[in-house]
Amino acid sequence: MANVLRMPEMNEATTAATVMASEETSNRKGSSAMKHSMNSAHQNTRVDYEQAITDSYDAAIMMQHCIDDLGALFVAIKDAATDGSNLQRLAGVGQYLADDWSGMNQANVEKISVVYEQLKAARRQVKRMEVAA
């Protein structure tokens, strides 16, 4: 079985803990240049995760629209075709596959939506912490 790379679970508590741990480590290092370097590296990593999550969410939503449109196209072809024709049967297969893919993709959209909402909550938490500091 292939190894699966899993992203750490993001929620408000883990994000806040990561930010605090990064600040604590920076304070122990002492040098302002070192602090800047560590904070930049931490922010670049966070931005990459944020961008990947946002891109995944957008792609999954776009895919859902495309699959739904494809299913509607097959329904239209099936309805326009002569009863019992090969075209009607082929359109029926296409409709079945589009419906199946739509269901699988919808499950992925729901999973990605949870992570996307956690990301938005983490962003709000970081903003609150920055305002409080």
Image (cartoon, rainbow, N blue to C red):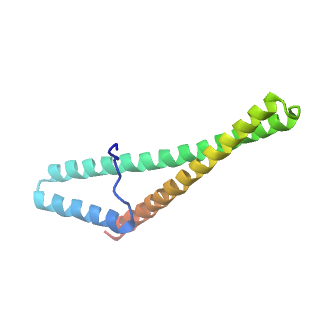
Q: Residue 57 placed where, x, y %?
A: 52, 49
Q: Is residue 54 left or right of residue 104?
A: left
Task: Name which residue lies at 43% across and 46% down.
Answer: 51
Task: Name which residue lies at 87% across and 34% down.
Answer: 80
Q: Is residue 98 left or right of residue 53?
A: right
Pick the residue in front: 101 or 84. 84
With respect to residue 55, does 15 lie above or below? below
Q: Is residue 24 left or right of residue 91?
A: left
Q: Quadrant of the N terminus?
A: top left
Q: Residue 33 placed where, x, y %?
A: 16, 49
Pick the residue in front: 34 or 64. 64
Task: Name which residue lies at 45% across and 64% down.
Answer: 121
- Residue that protrudes farthest toward the top in the picture: 86
Pick the residue in front: 87 or 14. 87
With respect to residue 25, does 41 lie above or below? above
Q: Residue 53 placed where, x, y %?
A: 45, 49
- Residue that protrudes farthest toward the bottom in the picture: 132
Q: Residue 93 placed where, x, y %?
A: 71, 37
Q: Quadrant of residue 78?
A: top right
Task: Name which residue lies at 31% across and 51% down.
Answer: 43
